[in-house]
Image (cartoon, helix red, strand yellow):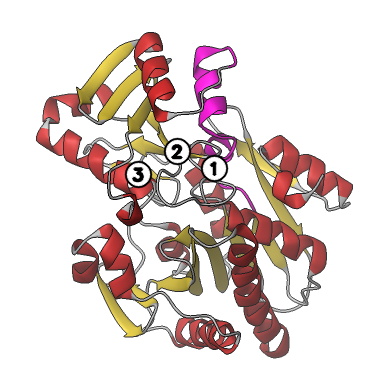
Amino acid sequence: MELFEIRTVRDVMQWLDEQNIPYSSLGDTAMGDPILAIEKPGEGAPVMITAGAHAGEPAGVFAALSILRDWTCKNPLVMVPLRDPFGFQGYEACLSHALKRPVRFETHAELWAMLKDNADALIYEDGDFLLVEIADILFTNLLPPADIALYAGPRTVEQRVNRTLKEHPELVAKTAGKRIVFPSNAGPVAENVWDFYRAFSAEITEAGIVADMNRRFGGDDEPNEVRYLRALCDRVQPPVVLDLHEGQGSSYYFFVPDYFGNRQIEKYTNIMHETLKNQGEQVTTLQDVENRLGGHIRESFDEPLPGVLVDKGLSSPQKDSGFSTYAGRYGAAITVETGRWAPLEKRVRLHLLAASALLDEMGKNG
């Protein structure tokens, strides 16, 4: 199977088998999908690499698998290449799972009609936004805006859900604790994501907030995708963690929880940053991200270097944190973001350049 043809976690398993790469399952999600892990022995400090926390970000998944196939890593390597297998299979497959029959649609209008026709409960409808419940799963659709160039993919849908629940608190009791599925993308074309090819999967918290599979680490009610990865992280206690994501723009940037207080984070981030710059890549800055996600981003992050975003509120491990913040209790945890609007090949290449720079440095210095 070709790497970029992988659609499901079963495809990942087939691909790993074809490459003779041993793997195990940390356990199943509530939807019945395995969370795969690969552990390669080596010398020195272990490196953990994860990807696919947001299922509409396939470049990190493909890059992680490429590392397993192509990279000889001196250090022990712990890999979780697909953290949300349910959403990764796409919106049609998620909806088919809920309806227990295959469905097909091509447009937002067709999806809208299908959701309304098959809803067990219509949670909310308002012009361009629809939220329904089918078989205890929430499905939503947001019609693409006229100014498509400023659309931020599923984050725009997430913001709409959060705003709706804030403005209508009576809906929180109907939605809290449930899985929610978004279209992955409805902005400028994101290759291998498109509108429905992947899905964005999350849960609604008791406070009425969308919490995706990169959140809620160390909380009281972790979904399986979070709990199994957190338990693996606690067992390995990796001094270096690289989490592969796709974000805004068409280049790259980094999220780090403690750039100012952790010399290793500063060192490894700078090495990856310089490697990508030396390849002629133009970094995506905080201003670029703010242009798509809104002014609250400026309030939340410092930017010690262009494209290095440090969360002001997450400089230390805490309950219900994101994965890199949680993993930061054991060492340097860095999130690499490649721009979702770039061609898939470029997005994967940027991840591989960053990861190889880190692995080379680890191999030289432990």
Q: Which residue is mark 1?
A: 84
Tell whether label 1 touches label 2 (CB within 8 Å): yes
Element class at badge 2: strand
Q: Is residue 136 left or right of residue 3?
A: left
Question: Which quarter of the rendering shows the C terminus?
Answer: bottom right
How far apart marks 3 and 2 lie (CA) works out to: 9 Å
The residue indicated by pointer 2 is 201
What numbered label is drawn on residue 224?
A: none
Mark 2 to mark 1 CA distance (whole Å): 7 Å
Viewer-closest of 141 and 16: 141
Q: Residue at x 31, y 56 (%)?
A: 150
Which label's residue is closer to the chain start, 2 or 1? 1
Mark 3 surroundings: few (<14), some (14-19) or many (≥20) residues within 10 A: some
The amino acid on which the numbered mark 1 sits, given as a three-letter code, is Asp
Is 363 placed above or below 31 here? below
Label 3 SS: strand
Q: Which residue is mark 3?
A: 211
Can residue 300 be seen at all in this image of the molecule? yes
- The magenta stretch spans which residues? 81-102
Q: Residues within 10 Å of mark 2 (few under 14, many from 20)?
A: many
Q: Residue 272 or 92: which is nearer the viewer?
A: 92
The kind of secondary structure element at disc 1 is: loop
295 inside magenta stretch? no
Tell me if I can see residue 178 in this picture.
no
Q: Residue furthest front?
A: 146
